[in-house]
Amino acid sequence: MTRPDISELNPRNIVAFIGDIFERRGAESYLGEQVTMSQHMLQGAQLAENADASDELVAAALLHDIGHYTNEFPEDALEQGIDNHHDEAGARVLERFFPSIVTDCVRHHVAAKRYLCATDGSYFGKLSDASVHTLNLQGGPMTEIEAADFAANPNLKAIVQVRYWDDEGKDPAVETPDFWHYAPLLQRVVDNHCKPAA
Ligand SMILES: [Fe+2]
């Protein structure tokens, strides 16, 4: 599809817009992992779907790394989000169309790794080598005060769950449906969030 400018990006075309990004950019590598970006995000969505997660959590697992592609989004949607922090940038471009439980999972998926390293003794051992490497760049495990602050987020449970799927969705042997399998689900989430107030 032709890339719409900001005035044309709306609840009717946002899902196709994201799908176009998956199709054109999905084959790019994922930070030293054995899977591509789209394999990784689709595996996250499949794990969520297999766990009978809500539409919102499947959407969050599917879109958690969309911030890696934020240069695809119209500039003024990003003006406060471009700082190379892909978690924050991803959340900012989604928040016009998706509810806060989705954008919180996207926004905090990197912090959730730092949180779990501080609070779950067995978690660090489950991280991939690439994820351990980025953990250090991302600030290492949270301090006790940071972790307590993070735990106050009302969406903590969802954020942590999406993080587990994020960590698990890195298996090159796993096959998934393509992006379009999830398009109706994404549209439901968008429609539900963007419907006019009664
Ligand atoms: Fe990820």
Image (cartoon, grey):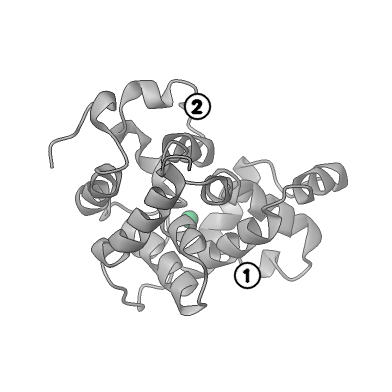
Front disc: 1 or 2: 2
Left or right, residue 114 beside residue 181: right
Residue type at mark 1: give it: Lys
| Quarter of the figure with the N terminus | top left
Mark 2 and ligand 1: say if the CB distance to the nearest ligand atom is below 8 Å.
no
Q: Residue 154, can we see it? A: yes
Could you tell me if residue 35 is visible in this image? Answer: no
Q: Residue at x 51, y 61 (%)?
A: 57
Q: Which residue occupies 69% across, 51% down?
A: 114
Question: Which residue is found at the position 56% from the left and 43% from the top?
Answer: 107
Mark 1, residue position:
126
Q: Is 8 placed above or below 104 here?
A: above
Q: Secondary structure at mark 1?
A: helix
Q: Residue furthest left?
A: 2
* Label 2 element class: loop
Which residue is the site of mark 2? 83
* Above or below 185: residue 4: above
Please tell me how many numbered marks the rendered image carries: 2
Position of residue 56 measured from the top left corner of the image (x, y, whole percent): 49, 59
Q: Report the disc number at residue 89.
A: none
Q: Quadrant of residue 74?
A: top left
